[in-house]
Structure formats: C-alpha cells, structure tokens
Amino acid sequence: MNENILERLHETFNASYGLPPAIVSRAPGRLEILGNHTDYNEGLVLGAAVTQSTYFAIAPNSSGNCRILSLGVEDTPAQIPLDKIHEKKDRDWKNYVKGVICEIRRRGGAIGGFDAAIASDVPLSAGMSSSAAIEVAACMALEKAFGLEFTPIERAKIGQASENNFVGANTGLLDQFCSVFGKADSLILCDFRQNKVLRNVPIPPGHSIIVVNSMVKHNLVESEYNERRKSCESVVAAIAKRDPSVKALRDLSTEKLDTFKDAVPLFDYRKARHVTGEDDRVLKAVELLDNGYLPAFGQLLFESHKSSRTNFENSCPELDYLVELAQSIPGCLGARLSGGGFGGISIHLVEENESENYMRRIKTAFRMKFGKDPQTIKCKAGDGAEWL
Ligand code: GLA
C-alpha cells in the first residue's frame, strides 16, 4: 500500500469536496508472466497483481451529478450529469469510470450522484493494466457507496465489459482477473475456461521481476489486438466444422492443431500455434517452479517471446532488442514481452543481487541503440483489490 498517495488522496478529497470520502478502494495493476493471448481462448495464464495500485475515494452526494478528479492528471473535478454518463470522450481516462457505471446499470444497479477522486502509481499506457486497476477500483467503490454487492468474478467481468463495450477494446478477462485475485509474493495460475484461480504458485526467493518498458506506446483499441483475436476465432470455426468438440483453442493441443494445418490460412495457423504453445508452457512452468528449476522456467519465457515474434507477430524491434539483451547480461534467467504486445513492456526474471546492475546495463544499451531511455520498474507481486 502506498501510504503517501493515500494521504494525498484524502487531503485532496477533503479540499475539493469539503468532506472526507465515505469509502476508499484499492485495485492493483497486473503482470502477465506467461500465457500470452490465451485468456480469450479459454486458456491458461500465470499472472500476478503488482503492488502499484489505483486508489478510488468516493462519497455519494444528493445532486444528479458525478464530480471526479484524478490527482496529477485532472486536479479540478470534472462534473458529469448522471444522464450523460454514457457519453464517451476520446482518450479520456474518465471513460473507464463511465464504462463501469454503464455496466453496473446494465446489471440493474442504481448509481446516484457522487464525488470522487482517484490516485494511482500504476505506470500509464505501459502494459501493466492501469485501465483494469481503475475499473476494478471504481467498481468496488461504487458498489459499496450504493449498497450493491457483486462477487469478485462479477467485478472482474464488469471491468472487462466496460473495456469491451464502452472503451472499444475486445480484450479478455486477464487484466481485471489478476487485479481482483492477485496474491502477495505469488503468481496465480488462472484458468479462463472456468474463470478460476487454480492455485497460487509462490515466487522463489532471491529473484526479482523487472519490467522494462519499450517506450513504444501500445493502444489496444487501435492495434492489431482485435485482428489477432479474429484469427484465433476463425481457426476454431474452421476446425469445429470437422471436429465439433473443438469450441476454443483450449481444446487443441499443439499436436492436434498441427493435424489441421492445411485446413486454415498459414497466417491464422501461426497465431493459433502461439496460443496452444503458451498453454503448454504455462503447465510446464508450474511444474518447474514447484521443483525449483528456475533456469528452465526462464527458458520458457525466452521461448514464449520467440513465439510472439515469429508466430503471433505481436513484438516490435524495441521489445526484441530488450529480450536479446536479456540473453547476454549476467543475472537474467528469462525475458519476454508481456501483455497485448505491439509495444508496451517486457518482463525480466533477474537474480535479486544483480538487479540494480542489470537495470543500469539494459538502460545504457537501449539508449545507445534507440536514443531513448527505457523505463525500468522492479515489481513485487501484491494482493488483489480491497476496500481500505
Ligand atoms: C491484454 C488484454 C488481455 C490479454 C493480454 C494478452 O493485456 O487486455 O485480456 O489478452 O493482452 O495476453
């Protein structure tokens, strides 16, 4: 918990609205450790919530308006009449809150006027799901403020639905799911067929997860994310005609997929092969982690990146270079792009006592090649969303 942010949030709330918040919620960002683009294919992901979070403070008011501000982004409250909540503005962070309100309404929940303030230390547009953190924090704050009660999985789905229906990104459930179900010092093995955490997988001590941002802005709405999703769906549709038991890529092992190679366009086949490969790698990874085989686990991260680069084609030269560096700088066991791709972040599993040196070296090399500084963030797995 970032006490500093929380204190500033309370102060700003008081100063702006003349009263303390009635409720404060916290929802973290997330990291996809392994299992790329598997979530919307009903597959498996090893994910984690991070300790960086969005904090959402709220107090219901008796007007028909929502007033909302974001520390350091929009310090004076914006006023939105309740009957205009469904109106979207281009590239506005408030869309994430509006989308959540629309989804709560769609589920029959009544939301009245409120004053709200948010503060966050989740890096923006980096691939750590700052948007999911706002959505889940908003959902929990609104839920409590207006006497509603959702289950944890409903909260994740409300966030995802607002992303799909309001923001316009056809994303899966991973980001909001990790934000809700994350566990401190642990990875979570997520099954998106059952929408369940199968188990927690402790992170072996003595290692850090370092995020290195490629500084290439990814925007899931405009990127090829939706196109990749279509490729996966069209492979399933083509195979289902021959084998109706196949309902999602999760139903296909890589070997079984290969038997249908000639039935689908090569481009789509390679996208599907990435996904089935990722499901396999997640299962192997859990076994390796359980047995303490860290170097072999690290190799799976490298393999995942290679498959992103060659099969799924969601990497970029900056991410490829970061992973290439990871293979040559001492102390790194594995690295890969993480999240949607097409820019955004890479994650690096690094020996704890090498981590400062590693970040320094990777920064210098990247700056020399691309003329810009990559942001590096040492991450810790944190607990999922909560009311404070
Ligand atoms: C983004 C999406 C997730 C997931 C990942 C790729 O983060 O929001 O739903 O599909 O990309 O694994």
Image (tube, grey):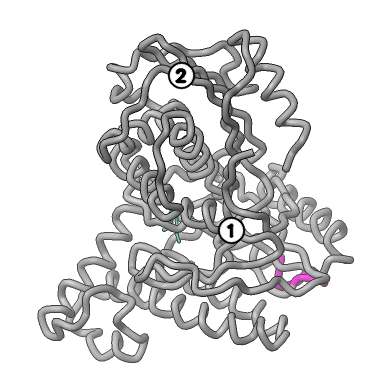
Asked whether residue 170 is drawn in magenta, I would say no
> Label 2, on which residue?
114
> Foreground mark, 2 or 1?
2
Q: Residue at x 64, y 65 (%)?
A: 323
Answer few, some or many: residues within 10 Å of disc 2's Cα (few below 14, many 20 plus, some between 14 and 19). many
23 to 228, vertically: above or below: above
Front-most of 303 and 154?
A: 154
Tell me if I can see residue 269 in this picture.
yes
Q: Residue at x 29, y 70 (%)?
A: 267
Q: Which residue is drawn at 38% across and 48% down?
A: 160
**Corner quadrant of residue 381:** bottom right
Q: Residue at x 37, y 45 (%)?
A: 158
Q: Mark 2 and ligand 1: say if the CB distance to the nearest ligand atom is below 8 Å.
A: no
> Label 1, on which residue?
182
Task: Tell me the CA gap for discs 2 and 1.
Answer: 29 Å
Q: Tell me the SS state at disc 2.
A: strand
Q: Position of residue 114 (x, y in %)?
A: 46, 19
Whether pointer 2 and pointer 1 mark residues with C-beta atoms closer than 8 Å, the reply is no
- Range drawn in magenta: 326-332
Q: Position of residue 168 (x, y in %)?
A: 31, 40
Answer few, some or many: residues within 10 Å of disc 1's Cα (few below 14, many 20 plus, some between 14 and 19). many
**Is 7 left or right of 337, judged from the image as shown?**
right
